[in-house]
Amino acid sequence: MTLEQICVTKEWAEKLKEAGYPQDDSFYKWCDYGEKSLVMPFLMSSEARSLRTSGHGGNIVPKFFSAPTASEILERLPRMVEYYECNLFLEIWKRISGEYAVKYKPNSGHVPLPVQLGRLPNALAKMYCYLVQENLTKKD
């Protein structure tokens, strides 16, 4: 597997940052040089902070975003959330299409929380952002 497969996409890395996901805890970082982006181990990104790329008549300072893996996001997601006095529990499954579904559901009955779909890291990132947006969990 490549780093791009085990980490969230750059788009979800940016959304996680906006949602308050910790930027210093992940082992991987997305490094954005404007027109070029790549994911790399954190130690390499520390060295890359000093790099400058010529372009557009000047130097471009790279931006860095935490690029967590699925397991790193799972560590931050609550096992259970309370929603309208009902306890909902985290459930993850792989669909026939190959994408993952992430949802919180009660032990019985139905509660209308959306199912987040995609590659596992992205589906978990979507759920993390949703929970923060809906105030169902605290920002880290």
Image (tube, grey):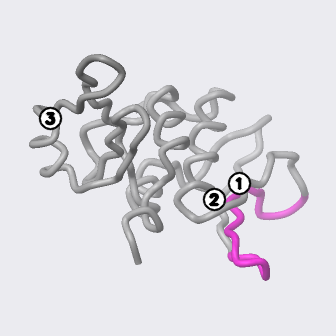
Where in the figure is residue 17, as x and y percent of width and height?
A: 44, 31
Where in the figure is residue 125, as x and y percent of width and height?
A: 55, 48
Where in the figure is residue 52, as x and y percent of width and height?
A: 18, 30
Determine whether, in the image, residue 73 is placed left or right of residue 81. Answer: left
Label 2: few (<14), some (14–19) or many (≥20) C-alpha neighbours in 10 Å:
some
Q: Earlier in the sequence, mark 1 or mark 2?
A: 2
Label 1: few (<14), some (14–19) or many (≥20) C-alpha neighbours in 10 Å:
many
Where in the figure is residue 77, as x and y percent of width and height?
A: 50, 49
Type of residue at label 2? Answer: Leu
Most extreme residue toward the bottom, as rendered? 96
Determine whether, in the image, residue 86 is placed left or right of residue 133. Answer: right
Q: Identify the residue at image location x=68%, y=40%.
A: 82
Determine which residue is flagged by label 3: 51
Question: In which quadrant is the N terminus drawn?
Answer: bottom left
Disc tally is 3
Instruction: Kindly indicate whether the residue at mark 2 contacts the one at mark 1 (C-beta within 8 angstroms).
Output: yes
Type of residue at label 1? Answer: Tyr
Q: Which residues are magenta?
A: 94-109
Instruction: Kindly indicate whether the residue at mark 2 contacts the one at mark 3 (C-beta within 8 angstroms).
Output: no
Determine which residue is flagged by label 2: 90
Q: Is 101 part of what is drawn in magenta?
A: yes
